[in-house]
Amino acid sequence: QHCMGINGLEKIILRENRGFSAEVYLYGGQVTSWKNELGEELLFVSSKANFNPPRSIRGGIPICFPQFSNLGSLEQHGFARNKLWTLDPNPPPFPTNSNNRAFIDLLLKNSGDDTKNWPHRYEFRLRIALGPTGDLMLTSRIRNTNTDGKSFAFTFAYHTYLYVTDISEVRIEGLETLDYLDNLKNRERFTEQGDAIVFESEVDKVYLSTPTKIAIIDHERKRTFVLRKDGLPDAVVWNPWDKKAKTISDLGDEEYKHLLCVQSACVEKAITLKPGEEWKGRQEISAVPSSYCSGQ
Ligand code: BG6
């Protein structure tokens, strides 16, 4: 379903039989809403978010491509989140017999204005799908379509803003004992100590070579987000906490309490594609009652 979103920007709504839904803006190719069968919002979007190109939308799932963070010569998190994507009217079907799920394919290609800092031709196909039990699946296929024989390299993240009831009551499982780069300490490498990740101050870490399954437990809401990823070895965890939040103009001062970014990513080792080569990276999130997960 196509409709007009904020400021006249085009958006598409996906619905699943049991009542799950998702909302996707063509601007940024960005998921801005994911609701469960009770209509509860599962993603965080700032009340101060700008739906004003060329600014990026604070919340949902921005796509960081072809650069994560400010690690290269491009703008922070690359240009994909600031572009108008197009909807593929005839997307290829799912490879398995699961065609009944709601999905759309968005496309991004070199529009000429990226050429200055990133002189490459590419085709980026982003599939956004709602699974039969409401899980939100994002699959990116990026192809090098250069005709000059040149390879290109990129880093990537699904910058997922999860909505949490109270960040102080949230725990992440699956990242303990791993190595990480700490963005708050000049990207120095450390090893995570302790049982599970909890939050009591600003966090900005890139966990390296993580397991493919990460659990984010919202104790207060008794909800667990289960994140599964494929082709994306790293996981970025970010919460700005109070002081940093005040410096971010499109984030309310107290809103940091309700957001937790857990991002399937490829940061430490860039992906290199030769002409004609394609890369695929997938993230799937489901939201289940916490009791359902215990003991798993
Ligand atoms: C995180 C980075 O992924 O995104 C942080 O690790 C950054 O360093 C944050 O502050 C938000 O970035 P932006 O550009 O959306 O404000």
Image (spheres, grey):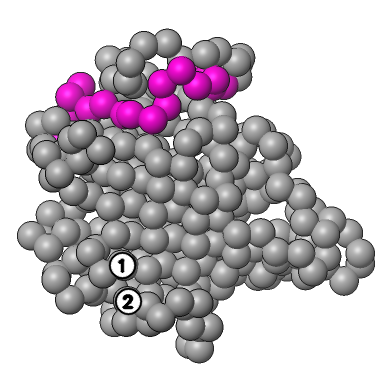
Residue under the point 45% across and 25% down: 204
Position of 30 relative to 100 (above/below): above
Can the viewer see residue 95?
Answer: yes
Position of 264 relative to 282 (above/below): above
Position of 102 relative to 47 (above/below): below
Q: Which residue is mark 2?
A: 101
Label 1: which secondary element: loop
Horizontal and vertical percent position of residue 16 = 22, 73
Viewport quadrant of the N terminus: bottom left
**In the rendered view, does 296 fall on the left or right side of 274?**
left
The 10 Å Cα crowd at callout 2, few under 14, some 14 to 19, many 20 or more, is some
Q: Which residues are magenta?
A: 165-185
Q: What separation in Å lies between label 2 and label 1 (alpha carbons)?
A: 6 Å
The reply to whether the C-beta atoms of the residues labelled 2 and 1 are less than 8 Å apart is yes
Can the viewer see residue 259?
Answer: no
Horizontal and vertical percent position of residue 131 = 31, 67
Q: Amino acid at mark 1?
A: Gly
**In the rendered view, does 238 fall on the left or right side of 141?**
left
The quadrant in which residue 26 appears is bottom left
Q: Amino acid at mark 2?
A: Arg
**In the rendered view, does 186 fall on the left or right side of 191?**
right
Q: Which residue is mark 1?
A: 131
Question: How many numbered badges does the structure rendering display?
Answer: 2
Farthest residue, direction right: 148
Horizontal and vertical percent position of residue 96 = 45, 77
Is residue 60 located in the magenta-colored stretch of the structure? no
Is residue 171 located in the magenta-colored stretch of the structure? yes
